[in-house]
Image (tube, coloured by chain):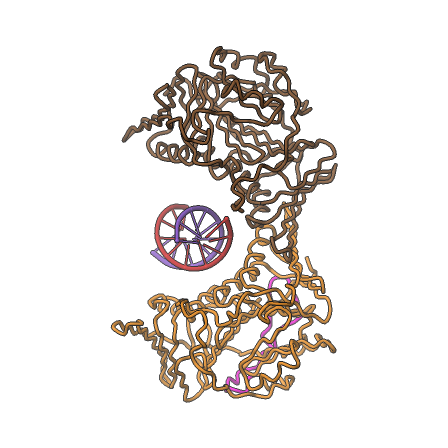
Chain colours: A orange, B brown, C red, D purple
Amino acid sequence: MLEARLGEAAILKRLIDAIKELVTDANFECNEEGLNLQAMDNSHVALVTVNMQASGFKKYRCDRPMPLGVNMNSLTKVLKCAKDDDVCIIKAADDADILSLTYEARNTDRIAEYEMKLMDIDSDTLGIPDTEYDARVTMPSAEFARIVRDLSQLGESVRIEVSKEGVRFISDGEAANGNILLKQTDAPARNGSSSKKKAASDDEEEAQASEDEENEEDEDGEKVKIKKEKVKKEKVKKEDGDVEMEGEEEGEDGEFQPKEDDEDGEEEQDEEGDSPSKKRKKAPVKSGKPAKKAKKVKTEDEDDDGPVGVSIEMNQHVTLTFSLKYLLNFAKSTTLSKKVVLMMSNDVPLLVSYEFGNGFIRYYLAPKIGDD
Amino acid sequence: MLEARLGEAAILKRLIDAIKELVTDANFECNEEGLNLQAMDNSHVALVTVNMQASGFKKYRCDRPMPLGVNMNSLTKVLKCAKDDDVCIIKAADDADILSLTYEARNTDRIAEYEMKLMDIDSDTLGIPDTEYDARVTMPSAEFARIVRDLSQLGESVRIEVSKEGVRFISDGEAANGNILLKQTDAPARNGSSSKKKAASDDEEEAQASEDEENEEDEDGEKVKIKKEKVKKEKVKKEDGDVEMEGEEEGEDGEFQPKEDDEDGEEEQDEEGDSPSKKRKKAPVKSGKPAKKAKKVKTEDEDDDGPVGVSIEMNQHVTLTFSLKYLLNFAKSTTLSKKVVLMMSNDVPLLVSYEFGNGFIRYYLAPKIGDD
DNA sequence: CCCGCTGCTA
DNA sequence: TAGCAGCGGG
């Protein structure tokens, strides 16, 4: 049995908004650590991953792991019936084919209950390789959205070049070409968000602060890191199974490895056998968040620790070309976080990651080859 | 080679916004005095003229005169990629077919560069007659926009009647008629903008202050004036060349004389041979402007010297009818200046003029005949 | 294809 | 804080 109480329905609304155009059906895999969703977009060009930590809920209980096969259209409809600041309770019986959504208005005198049909979705959960990226760019999500929007006026695709100089977004179009250079924000005096980049501060060791910006760990056992010393991006692109990225013109680089159908809950990432990610249990997270900016009823970003700068970490120059259409889509997550992180290695899918309070949404997009 | 540094991209954005629906392609003629654009609207009913003084730029350099053939759609797209307060640098090599637009964010860590294809446009630059108008109406541009908007709901055209009483805008529609009377704002206490109307204070003689409101001169050699004593409006409507206004139902009154292709800058009006306009050389214009209202970072109207009233100067009554569709279009320039000036003589094209810091945009529209 | 709503920008 | 633009829904 699953029962999860979400403080603000808005988070869920935004999440679903952010993926519903990419994905029509997907399984929410729930276990005692939280909810996870993973799905290829309809044309199998992009992959979306959503994680909501148990700790991100005001109350969370999941007796045993189970997949909740959700149709995004239905869920969208049901979620529209929630007000942004409603408390949202998600319930599912152990073997039920029904998901129950309850919305409690802040003033308890309104309680709405919806029941949505679930469906059986046979999803091959992909193992996402524990990639070490050559470049990581952190920037304001709004800026990313703006750039992508601007450039998509000019052309179909964007070339992203990361160098020490900064990140450059380049688009060649019929009538005009454009390129936008984002220099790294000066490190100092930026509440720690600029060059010092501790990405995940939540799990077991925050002592990691010493090894500064090289590591980013995610609570669900995935691990994505940047190594300055060694670069092994090649290990990302091989041993594909039967489900892989097969988008428009991009070819065989950087697929995801499908991991057949053992959705046994927790050990999802480990049988890839690569990451030394010590499987961590969810840390007891103080629910609610330390009141800063108490006045904002808006539910959003806990990410929000001050102004967001641009910061770049890289091992080597990276140049990749992507379809703007997809990036435009990813940018729908802008409302979820003020910050976005782009992780790139040559010939490997781009990872676009938005983190919000106790969870994240990540998009993977294979680069166009031939760099056209 | 052209290089012009504009303090606020917004000005250019607004300018192009204001004409892009009228004109699809046009030459920006640039010379050391600044940028000029002149174009007939697509249906050859209206004429637009834009001038941006060199002094209006933070930096301006133009080695030799050249036309920049711009497609407004492309330019619009590219300008959308600029934020309003970006610094905008326009560059073009001497013989290049490319225009480069660079946007520097206020905080320099974002630089965007766009390159837009230029095109060859064979424009017959028209000589705009040095008309002496019988009536000049100055009013808040917002008011003009409002009137035009309101009346265009009722009918297709508006009759403008200028008398000592004031200006009256009249529209007869199917369902309703409307007329709006604007009386002259009481002269006193209006920082000189109401009945006292020196429009251009820039050229050779500002000793003209004595002959008060009769003259308006523009820096690029054009001259438009009101003469109280003598009225020779007839001289405006004849000797047309090959390019003329040929709109819907309006006929042969008030065309512009095409002046073939000698875009030699200054002597545009003189070969009309009518006006006693002593050909004036461009006066040394003091760049920048006397700091008043230093606090407003907003880019717009330097025109903005206080509240704008309605003022009317006239030699004789004028009654003209115009297509509201066009006026509606002209009113897009409202954001460029708080003030608009309407210049009219019977049977002569209306001149609608917006002046902004070191430049202007002017529209000419032939009257409907038969006054329907 | 048009209208309304949401988000972003000024 | 208000207006404009882009996106989504009917």
| Residue B113 magenta-highlighted | no
Above-or-below relation of B243 to A160: above
Q: Can see residue B260?
A: no
Q: Position of residue A69 (x, y in %)?
A: 43, 76
Quadrant including the C terminus of chain A: bottom right
Residue B216 placement: quadrant: top right
**Which SS type dominates the magenta stretch?**
loop
Instruction: Look at the picture and state if A276 lies above or below A158.
Output: below
What residue span does the magenta drawing correspond to? Answer: A242-268
In the image, A72 versus B7, the foreground residue is: B7
Q: Is residue A255 rendered magenta in the image?
A: yes
Residue in the picture at 61% in, 18% down = B269
**Residue lying furthest left in this view?**
A109
Quadrant assignment, res B268: top right
Q: Residue at x 69, y 31 (%)?
A: B31
Q: On screen, B316 above or below D7?
A: above
Residue A42 or residue B94, whichever sits in front = B94
* Quadrant of the image containing the N terminus of chain A: bottom left
In the image, residue A17 above or below residue B132: below
Coordinates of residue A164 in the picture (x, y in percent): 72, 65
Q: Name the one closer to the observer, A147 or C1.
A: A147
Q: How many marks?
A: 0
Residue A200 can be seen, yes or no: yes
Q: Position of residue A289 (x, y in %)?
A: 45, 77
